[in-house]
Amino acid sequence: MYFLLFSSNRLFCVPFLIPSFFICLFLLFVHDRPFHACCQARGPKKHMKRLAAPHHWMLSKMGGVYAPRPSTGPHKLRECVPLVVLLRNRLKYALTRREVIMIVMQRLVKIDGKVRTDANYPAGFMDVFQIERTNESFRLLYDSKGRFVLHRVSKEEANVKLLRIKSKAVGGKAMIGKNPFLNGRAGSIPYITTHDGRTIRYPDPNINIHDTVKFDFVENKIIETYKFVPGNLAMIIRGNNVGRVGTIVSHEHHQASYDIIHLKDTRGNEFSTRLQNVFIIGNGNTASISLPKNKGVRISVIEEREKRLEKAAAPAKKA
């Protein structure tokens, strides 16, 4: 019994009973391509094709083969925007990547009050993007269509951001430090972790997972807490309803599955999503930060078309 082995320009017949070890050696020395060309590269990936980039970056399909791959940082790859996209594609302060590198290497760009010199640094939801030379501050939020938008904020609002609590625990000495005045378990330090990778020690005991805190990153302290309870205002940060803002109506608990949160926006439209997708942004119906255009209310395609036609017809009437 025989089976066939194919190379780029040869056809071989090899007895079926030959051990697999010898077959591998045979392929290694006979095949035209070098062996190392068939192996995967080691280490983290360093490239990203433009078609594989997240759609909310809004990069043109024909603008080149590759897109800037975000560096590792506090936000996930699919939930962030690299600085080069913000400076070049959104704000138009640069024409090329080389010009973006010149800008950031002059230490002109700050994220949450810290200078960032990496052109691929990942800026994510609720991050404050500042350029002191132009005296501009922006907050990275989602619009009602689920795309990242640079929302201009005032100087007072540029010092604070909202943080969603991801975990709450008591750390060991090797992990988070130890209270030198207490021994044993009593000396362990309580802490919380947030959605942007921060670890805050000695938080208010009333703060729980899924709550939101208003954090002043200049003075490095928590100003206010917003509880995850029905009646509070929230923004959706993942899923099909990303970017929508509504008031929490109810909380469905499902054992061994995902909890479902039901919300209602200011127009009375009801929608639901998973618990992990909800980000509290204020107590009651009042948002603690300013919101971008449409205030998180998603309109239909027909309504959007009518608004666009009205806007186009307005200059014609004036003329």
Image: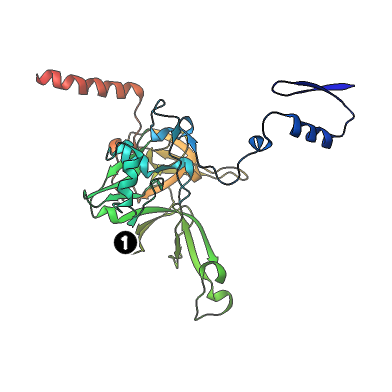
Q: Nearer the viewer, residue 121 or 137?
A: 121
Image quadrant where one finds the N terminus: top right
Query: Does residue 286 appear in the picture of this structure?
Result: no
Q: Nearer the viewer, residue 303 or 194?
A: 194
Q: Quadrant of residue 268?
A: top left
Q: Residue furthest bottom?
A: 181
Q: Residue furthest left?
A: 319
The percent position of residue 154, horizontal first and vertical second, equals 23, 50
Q: Amino acid at mark 1?
A: Val
Q: Nearer the viewer, residue 127 or 83?
A: 83
The percent position of residue 191, horizontal first and vertical second, equals 48, 64
Label 1 secondary element: loop
In the rendered image of this protein, does residue 200 appear above or below residue 239?
Answer: below
Q: Is residue 31 left or right of residue 169?
A: right
The percent position of residue 306, horizontal first and vertical second, equals 27, 21
Disc 1 crowd rating (10 Å Cα; few below 14, some 14-19, many 20+) is few
Q: Which residue is mark 1?
A: 218
Image quadrant where one finds the C terminus: top left
Query: Does residue 108 appear in the picture of this structure?
Result: yes
Residue found at x 50% / y 79%: 180
